Amino acid sequence: MNNKRRARGQAGVTLIEMLVVVTIIALFAAVVAPRMLRKTDTARATAARQQVNSFMTALGTYKLDTGLFPTNEQGLQALRVKPQGVNQWQGPYLPQEIPVDPWGRPYAYKYPGEHGDEPDVISYGADGQPGGDGINTDIVSWKSQ
């Protein structure tokens, strides 16, 4: 009978033990969560940079085949669908549809570009506006970042 009482007393978890565990989890989340959110922003910027580089490679191949870069009206879609009146198009130059940037907005395409002979491809960052700092920094084709 004495053994049953001892076993019953040791079977459960006390309220104090639960509060200690919950407090430890809350402290861990308070320290780790902000760091994880910063990593998410960094990952989005890296993904946008890689996608812009992929566009630039595909645009270079497009120009080798056709002799021209796509016009502003044709845009990046010319890498997937043959524009009317374009000879020597050998595409599609990208394996999937033109993606939006990691923030869910379309990439900006300008040709002729303002920064050299190649087109400008731009993701305007988290705020979707030209310029900005931190997570709002523009990801652009003419700078390696």
Image (spheres, rainbow, N blue to C red):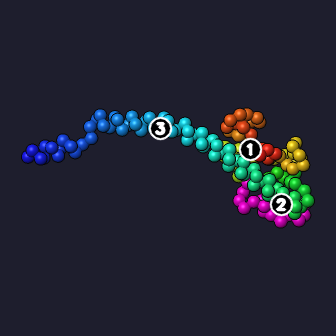
Mark 3 vs mark 1, foreground winner is 1
* Residue 128 appears in the figure: no
In reply to whether residue 93 is colored magenta, the answer given is: yes
Amino acid, disc 1 = Gln
- Mark 2 vs 1, N-terminal side: 2
- Neighbor class of circle 1 (other Cα within 10 Å; few <14, some 14-19, many 20+) is few
- Mark 3 vs 1, N-terminal side: 3
Q: Secondary structure at mark 2?
A: helix
Q: Nearer the viewer, residue 6 or 79?
A: 6
- Magenta segment, which residues? 78-98
Q: Is residue 43 left or right of residue 138?
A: left
Q: Nearer the viewer, residue 139 or 144?
A: 144
* Residue 110 appears in the figure: yes
Q: Quadrant of residue 124?
A: top right
- CA–CA distance in space, label 3 to label 1: 31 Å
* Residue 109 picture location, percent across and down: 81, 47
Quick one: quadrant of the C terminus? top right
Q: Which residue corresponds to mark 1?
A: 145
In reply to whether residue 132 is colored magenta, the answer given is: no
Amino acid, disc 2 = Thr
In this rendering, is residue 63 above or below 19?
A: below
What residue do we see at 78% from left, 61% from top? Answer: 93
* Residue 139 picture location, percent across and down: 74, 43
Q: Which residue corresponds to mark 2?
A: 61
* Residue 72 picture location, percent across and down: 86, 48
Amino acid, disc 3 = Ala
- C-beta proximity under 8 Å, tags 2 and 1: no
* Residue 123 picture location, percent across and down: 74, 43
